[in-house]
Image (spheres, rainbow, N blue to C red):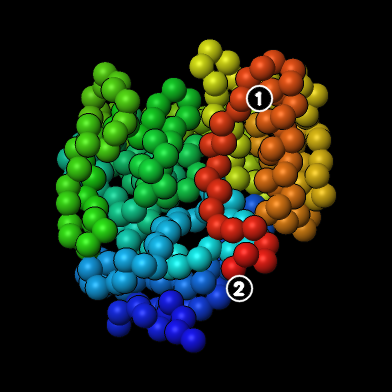
Amino acid sequence: MTRPCDMLPPVRGSIQRDAGLKDMVWFRAGGVAEILFRPADVEDLGMFLAARSTDIPVTVIGVGSNLLVRDGGVPGTVIRLPASFGKIEAQGMRVRAGAAALDAHVARVAADAGIAGLEFLRGVPGTVGGALRMNAGCYGREISDILVEATALDNEGRKVTLTRAEMGFSYRHSEVEGSPDAPEAIKARMEALAASREAAQPIRAKTGGSTFKNPQGAKAWELIDRAGCRGLKVGAAQVSEKHCNFLINTGEATASDIEALGEEVRRRVRDKDGVSLEWEIKRIGLPLGALA
């Protein structure tokens, strides 16, 4: 029987079958990737995309800070960008960063260069690629506020440049470059943001960050709290006592435990306030036993 891995084009990077993803996501739970591909560089990734069979699905993951991999695993090819895709460079009042660059590292490079306006990235977990995909943000700022342009590869491996408008972000009136300021002042603001985040969120737990999007005119955590879900458990998965829009793995929770807990929270909020919470965490893969 031909396996999808046997149909892949030759690459210079690494390919691994049945690769565990549990240790690549912050929840520390979940199944395997049928195929895990780590490209050597942009050219290697482009050649793979151009030559791959379109019958094989492709999923791209970052460092898994806002991701739940279901216990049955992810069919097809999972692409994880290595450190070579994480270079960061300050250029005038702009910063150029690779998709695998950690958001917090981008903030530090900007601060060292005296570029203000990117401090909020210190409080955004994950990578630049994931932040762009989700328009991540905190403390009143989002990636859409600061993006100048993004360079990407399309499904056929061709390099394309996307403007902020082409990324599909909602419009916000803001400057697309940073502004000059003293590095010490920028770093002080970053540390204040980090301290505020640690005081309010269970960032040292095994968690995937904010679980649900804030509904229009409301805050998800307040709805969850009002529905009596603070501390609620399913197996080893628990609604955080510290911030109840966070689900945490208290030990050996499965992805099924975590997802079931989230659905129970959604049910209780819907019954209490008539609001259907929308998942913010990205859930990928199949139920247990579905990937044979």
The structure residue drawn at horizontal position 42% and vertical position 39%, both measured from the top left corner, is 134
Q: Residue at x 81, y 35 (%)?
A: 232
Q: Quadrant of residue 92?
A: top left
For the C terminus, the image quarter is bottom right
Residue 81 or residue 141, whichever sits in front: 81
Rendered location of residue 230, percent (x, y): 78, 29
Q: Taking the image as drawn, is residue 242 in sight?
A: no
Residue lying furthest bottom: 1
Along the polypeptide, which appears first: circle 1 or circle 2? 1
In the drawing, what numbered circle is on residue 16?
Answer: none
Q: Which residue is mark 2?
A: 292
Crowding near the residue tagged with mark 2, few <14, some 14–19, many ≥20 C-alpha atoms within 10 Å: few
Residues 119 and 100: in front is 100
**Can you give x and y, in whole percent of width and height, for residue 103 in the image?**
41, 45
Q: In the displayed image of the protein, which residue is found farthest to the top?
A: 217
Is any part of residue 264 visible from this angle? yes
Nearest to the observer: residue 239 or residue 204: 239
Taking the spot 40% from the left edge, 26% from the top edge, the residue there is 141
Whether 209 is drawn above or below 88: the answer is above
Rounded to the nearest whole Å, what is the CA distance between mark 1 and mark 2? 38 Å
| Amino acid residing under circle 1 | Trp
Three-letter amino acid code at the position of disc 2: Ala
Q: Would you place residue 186 above or below residue 29 in this image? A: above
Residue 59 quadrant: bottom left
Q: In the visual, does 227 lie left or right of 281? A: right
- Which residue position holds label 1? 221
When asked about the image quadrant of residue 155, the answer is bottom left
Q: Secondary structure at mark 2?
A: loop
Give coordinates of residue 219: x percent, y percent: 59, 20
